Image (cartoon, helix red, strand yellow):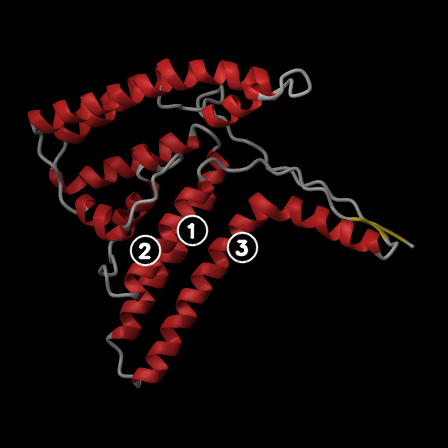
Amino acid sequence: MTIKTHLRYNFPEIKIFGEKRIMLFNSVEFLIFFPVVVLIYFLIPDRVKYLWLLAASYYFYMCWNARYALILLFSTAVTWVSGLLLERIKHGEMEEGKKAFAKKGVVALSFLLNLGVLFWFKYVDFAMMMLERLFNLVHIQLSLPEFDILLPVGISFFIFQALSYTMDVYRDEIYAEKNFFRYALFVSFFPQLVAGPIERSKNLLKQLAIPQKFSFSRFKDGILLMLWGFFLKIVLADRIALFVDTVYVSIKIYDGWYLIIAKLLF
C-alpha cells in the first residue's frame, strides 16, 4: 500500500536595504549599530527611551529575515494578553476554585500556542520522518509533505523567555505589564534576543521600566565585559573551530584521541 502526498512550503525573505545581512555581534555592522543605539539612548528623553530600544531590537532581528519578526510579535502578543488575563482573573469575583482553573487554562493556552509555533519550525520535519518510519513498520509506504522551512534565528530563546513571563505572572512573581511596547522590549531586547541567556521577567522587565542615566563606571565595566567576550569568541572559539570542523568533516580519517579532543573542544 502506498499513500503519497507532496507539498513544499517556502517562506520568502524580505531584504533590508537591498542585501540581506545577519548582524553578528562580531560583525562590522554591529560595531556601527551598537554605539549608535547607545548614544541615541542617552540623548533622547526618558519617556521614549524604551521605544527607541524596541525599534532598535526589531531592526536588529529583521536584518536577518524581516518576515520572521511576525513570529516574534505573535509570541509577544499571546503572552502579553495571557498576563493581562491572569491579572484580571486574580482580582475577579470568581470562587477560588474557578479562579485556579481559569488561570491554568490561560497558561495552558499560552503554552499551546507558543510551543505549537516552536514545534512547527523546529520539529515538524523530524515528526514527519518518524511517522513515515512508523508506517513502514506495517508495510505502508507513506510519503508525507516536505516542508522547506528556514529556522527563525533565536526562536527558542524568545519563546521560552515569553513563556517564563506567563509563569511569573501566574505565580505572582511579577506584575502584569500593561504597556505592550515595554513588554515587547523585554521579549525582543537585542543583546540577548538571538543567543540568550533566557532572562526572567522579574529581573529584566523591572530594569527596562526604569530609564537609565549614563554612568562612566558602568560604561567601563560593560566595555571590559564585552572585550572579554570578543576575546573568547574571536581569539579562542573561532581558532578552536578550525580543529573541530576539520575533524568533524573527516571522521573516517581521524579517530581515537582526535575525536575525543574535538568533542571536548566543541
**Which quadrant, please, contains the N terminus?**
bottom right
What secondary structure is found at the residue carrying circle 1?
A: helix
Residue drawn where x is 27% and y is 23% of the image: 34
Q: Is residue 96 left or right of residue 242?
A: left
Residue drawn where x is 14% and y is 26% of the image: 221
Residue drawn where x is 36% and y is 48% of the image: 161
What secondary structure is found at the residue carrying circle 3?
A: helix
Answer few, some or many: residues within 10 Å of disc 3's Cα (few below 14, many 20 plus, some between 14 and 19): some
Residue 2 in percent (x, y) is at: 89, 52
Q: Is residue 177 left or right of residue 66?
A: left
Residue 122 in percent (x, y) is at: 56, 44
Q: Which residue is mark 1?
A: 75
Instruction: Say which of marks 1 and 3 sits in front.
Output: 3
The amino acid at mark 1 is: Ser
**Residue at mark 1 to residue at mark 3: CA–CA distance:** 11 Å
Q: Is residue 27 visible?
A: no
Q: Which residue is mark 2?
A: 165
What secondary structure is found at the residue carrying circle 2?
A: helix
Answer few, some or many: residues within 10 Å of disc 1's Cα (few below 14, many 20 plus, some between 14 and 19): many
The amino acid at mark 2 is: Tyr
Instruction: Say which of marks 2 and 1 sits in front.
Output: 2
Residue drawn where x is 18% and y is 45% of the image: 207
Instruction: Choose the circle earlier in sequence order: 2 or 1.
Output: 1
Could you say which is closer to the camera, residue 148 or residue 170? 170
Q: Taking 19 as reference, is 144 above or below it?
A: below
